[in-house]
Amino acid sequence: MSARPVSRGLLSAASSKHLRSIVPRVAAFHSITPKNDQSNSEPVTHFGFQTVKASLKATKVAEVFSSVASSYDTMNDVMSFGIHRLWKDHFVRSLNPGRRPGGQPMSILDVAGGTGDIAFRMLDHSEKVNGDRETTVLCTDINADMLREGEKRAIQGGYDSNRISFCVENAETLESIPDNSIDLYTISFGIRNVTSIPKALKSAHRVLKPGGVFACLEFSKVSPAPLDAIYQQYSFSIIPLMGQLVAGDRDSYQYLVESIKRFPSQSEFARMIKDAGLANVGKGYEELTFGVASIWKGVKPLE
Amino acid sequence: MNNTLRANLSGPSIRWILSKPIISSSAPSRCSFLAAPRIELRRRYHSYQHPAPAPPFTTAELAILSASLLHVPSHGFSDAALSFGARDAGYLDISVNMLSRGVFDLVHYHLATERLRLSDKIDFRKPENELPECLRNLSIPAKIRVLCMERLKANVPIIHRWQEALAVMSLAGNIPASMSELAKLSDEIWFLAGDESHDTTWYTKRATLSTVYASTELFMTQDNSKDFEATWEFLDRRLNDVKTIGSAVSNIASYLDFTVHAFANVLRSKNAPFF
């Protein structure tokens, strides 16, 4: 009942007639989904602009990432003109991981870090900046295909297997990770794909040591408005097209841009972090490139 | 006594006008376009109408910063001092991420705490008989000098590290916060000296004191004299300069005023048009 106007609003906000002509598939889905919601009492969630059963979202996200795993980083470079590397470098540098003089080596958990982008940067930073060869990174992802990419790269890059390990984990539960065991929890361009974000934040709170840091790098809302209009046009018309040309997979990239659009705003997500019991850092977030991406940090309070 | 002082200062002065919130939440709805987002003016000066703003740091940040400051004499204004401070406060090394501006937060903490501590040390608004003997019956410039010296003395334990702090403060992103802290300090000093000016000198006094204080502080980082005597002499010379400049400006102003009027009168006596 209420899903219809909402989704129409999102579509028109996202783009104009132009979009509808490019993606009739999405528009078609919208006219069907509200009926499905009504006939079913199972909880639903969003998958891009579609509404799906909560239990199905994980599988659908898995499909997306299995199909893009091999071309994932090439596509990132193409779509962001390489800027995602600057964001990730800044993210890691600002966290400054690694053992300090007179301190202990850190134990870092990189969630949804399949291809190891952040994990390798963490290891490089702690070694080159802080002279630390002991800090360890556990790289988890819900998707085994993405993790295999990461493992392959860890071997290619000659990383010490004692310092980096890979493990399939659901970010909502993090079952194999004990309570109060992690210094630094990072999740980079992953949290918007999680079915229940509050659950994932609760798990982050659970595994972090008191005083431990939660850090999230994710797409966010662009401002000012004229730039946002350009950005929306770019993401809804050009990114799916590039996905088709470069990776041969239009649907996955269509999902990608829709999921970005659905992700909460900077301040809303900062509030969600606070609600999970993590203290916001500063105003809660730091915007990168006019808010195309943002960094949120939270610190688990002492008991 | 206190009440009369309050009444004096809460008159319709520019300070009062500036300190009024743009719109209060209980405003009638005919100006609802203004009432929608409630705008709070940030307080940049002393006001009797508004409570003092909350301290700029949370309790957790304060725990780390106050512990870190103790490590500044040995480790400087650096990440190392912050890590040691975090450990002392029971946090992890990584917890220093709580400070969104890193080392600058440590510098800012020092500036803010020492500014706020100044009023506990010396407050010329108190009745004369509550002041120590040596601080009674001083002129306003003498009071300013005493307050400046008191604030500069708070830098003595870390003066050998203060150049690092000045370097951090001069980074582009930190300049606005550093300047605002300097402005607040000079406002604090004039306020504690009991200055009640309501005219444009409110601004010029604060601007000149800011330059005097900043240059003296810079001088102090290079001062090797016993008990910083050279710094106090430097401060006196700067304060004298201000006095000289101030009287020069007012002399020039009265000279110009006289000349323009005399010239106009000459023209009038000649029946020139427009006069």
Image (cartoon, rainbow, N blue to C red):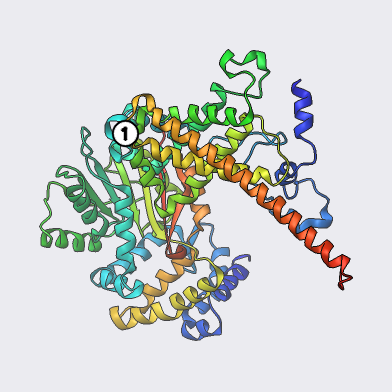
Q: Check the image and report above or below for A38 versus A174.
A: below
Compared across the picture, whether A189 is left or right of B25 comes to left
Q: Nearer the viewer, residue A165 or A300?
A: A300
Left or right of A44, for residue B104: left
The image position of residue A253, as x and y in percent, is: 38, 74
* Disc 1: host chain: B
The secondary structure type at the circle numbered 1 is helix
Specify the quadrant of the image occupied by residue B64.
Answer: top left
Q: Residue at x 49, y 56 (%)?
A: A266
- Residue A88 point in image, percent of width and height: 31, 59
Residue B124, picture quadrant: top right
Within 10 Å of disc 1 (Cα), the crowding (few <14, some 14-19, many 20+) is some
Left or right of residue B29: residue B222? left
Q: Residue at x 32, y 46 (%)?
A: A185
Q: Is residue A169 left or right of residue B24?
A: left
Identify the residue shown where x is 40% and y is 33%. B65
Closer to us: B172 or A170: B172
Q: Position of residue B234 (x, y in %)?
A: 44, 35
| Quadrant where the image shows the C terminus of chain B | bottom right
Nearer-the-camera pick, A133 or A67: A133
Residue A211 location (% of width, % of height): 36, 35
The residue carrying mark 1 is: B160
Work out whether residue B189 or residue B138 is closer to the camera in this orientation and state it. Answer: B138
Residue A271 visible to the viewer: yes
Residue A170 in view:
no
